[in-house]
Image (spheres, rainbow, N blue to C red):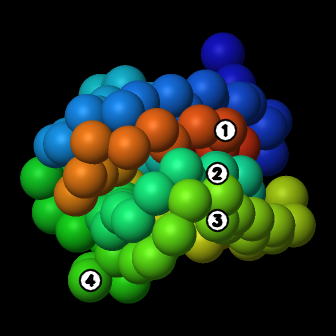
Amino acid sequence: MATPYEILKAEVNFNTIGDHTIVNGAAGKQIYIRSINLIVNGAQILIFKTGSTALAPANGFNFSAAGQLIELLRGYRDAYMITNAGDNLVINGSAAVQVSGFIEYSQS
């Protein structure tokens, strides 16, 4: 079982429009997003969600061209985003372009 500060890694790899579950939720537990490392190969808006509800920024991350990188790093005690207890971490892609990379998270 993961401790609150044990960092886990989830692969991100999709190229279709719509919602993509990145981390499955667990009953009564929240997912704490510690770092985001993604490369996007075309124009795309990525919206991070707790279940079906958008997380901040609610309008998503906007990429205008191929090869753009998002790299957000946090310390072990801080989180960029936190899901609701039991919810999946979901990324919604607005376009059918490749999104690759990983997310580091903890769950408690």
Where is residue 63? Give x, y as percent.
Answer: 47, 73
Name the residue tied to disc 1: 102
Q: Is residue 46 visible?
A: yes
Where on the picture, by quarter, is residue 97?
Answer: top left
The quadrant holding residue 5 is: top right
Badge 1 crowding class, 10 Å Cα cut-off, few under 14, some 14 to 19, many 20 or more, is some
Q: CA distance from mark 2 to mark 3?
A: 8 Å
- Which quadrant: the N terminus? top right
Give the residue number, with chain letter if any, for mark 3: 68
Query: Of the numbered discs in the image, which one, if any, rests on residue 59?
Result: 4
* Mark toward the start of the polypeptide (3 vs 1): 3
- Residue at (65%, 58%) from the top-left corner? 67
Q: Which mark is nearer the camera, 2 or 3?
A: 3
Q: Secondary structure at mark 3?
A: strand
Distance from disc 4 to disc 3, alpha carbons, whole Å, reads: 18 Å
Q: How dense is the environment of label 3, judged by Cα within 10 Å: few (below 14), some, or many (20 and up)?
A: some
